[in-house]
Image (spheres, rainbow, N blue to C red):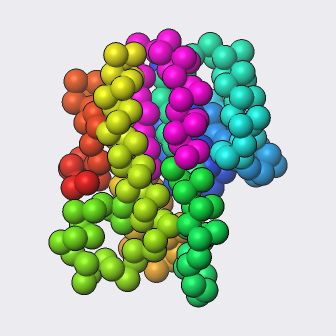
Amino acid sequence: MTKNGKVVLITGANKGLGKEIGRQLGALGYTVVLTARDEQAGRAAAAELVAAGCEAYTVRLEVTNPDDIGSLVSYLDTTFGKLDVLVNNAGISIEWDGKPTDADKVRRTLEVNLIAPYAITEALVPLLSRSDDARVINHSSMLGSIGTAESMWKQVGGFMAVGYSTSKAGLNMLTLIQSKTLANKGIGVAAAHPGWVKTDLGTQAAPMEVAEGASTVVDLVTIAREKFPNGQLWHKGERMPW
């Protein structure tokens, strides 16, 4: 397989959408680095991709742990000397457990889904700045779209959990802010809505297979730079409302 010299880091990538994004990008010649909280699960996912012909590595990362983030930066700097693409994929959804949402659930969700992507991106800006086509893609959701919530509440209200939807709305704003503040460093930033996908989070009730759900992020990674939708939320080649 021909390598294209570009390094992609995907957080929360030992299963589901993260691993599938890595598989698809690896098949296109990208070097993929998968992070996982569980080191053994990360190694198994990377080995699976290597067996499929990809160049894949894994790093342990608890996304809310500053020491882990520091170790990740050091690993990427030492191993590759740069980073071309960051996919902030790791996320949690802990409010659909049949129990009432409380402040602790909201706080934990915001830590993983919003604060962690901010901290990881900021820590990796120096390495992204060394790329000639740096991109950050935040895995968001239409459930964080204020416009959708306002205009389609009857259809989507039942899915709008306070912590999850607020975290994704915040991630959308973070995407817009960083698309402006990092532009002078040559770093493009966009958000992706994968759709309702058959994952641990989406459940088997979802209509989309994982391979299809991964396609929006893969498109944002591979699209020509002049067509990259900087500061926008995208799904399958179309812009979605904030």
- Residue 104 horizontal/vertical position (percent): 64, 69
Q: Which residue is drawn at 25% across and 84% down?
A: 154
On the question of residue 38 being in view, the answer is: yes
- Furthest-right residue in this view: 40
Q: Which residue is drawn at 71% across and 29% down?
A: 70
Q: Which residue is drawn at 38% across and 24% down?
A: 182
User: Which quadrant would the N terminus be assigned to in this image?
Assistant: top right
Q: Relative to residue 42, is residue 80 drawn left or right?
A: left
Check the image and report above or below for 12 versus 106: above
Residue toward you, 181 or 94: 181
Residue stretch in magenta: 115-139
Quadrant of residue 161 within the rendered picture: bottom left
- Residue 184 horizontal/vertical position (percent): 34, 16
The question of residue 117 being in magenta is answered with yes
Q: Relative to residue 206, is residue 40 drawn left or right?
A: right
On the question of residue 47 being in view, the answer is: no
The question of residue 239 being in magenta is answered with no
Q: Which residue is drawn at 40% across and 42% down?
A: 174
Quadrant of residue 240 within the rendered picture: bottom left
- Residue 208 horizontal/vertical position (percent): 40, 67
Q: Relative to residue 154, is residue 172 drawn left or right?
A: right
- Residue 218 horizontal/vertical position (percent): 40, 41
Check the image and report above or below for 119 versus 238: above
- Furthest-left residue in this view: 151
Check the image and report above or below for 189 versus 95: above
Quadrant of residue 53 within the rendered picture: top right
Residue toward you, 129 or 150: 150
Check the image and report above or below for 90 versus 1: below
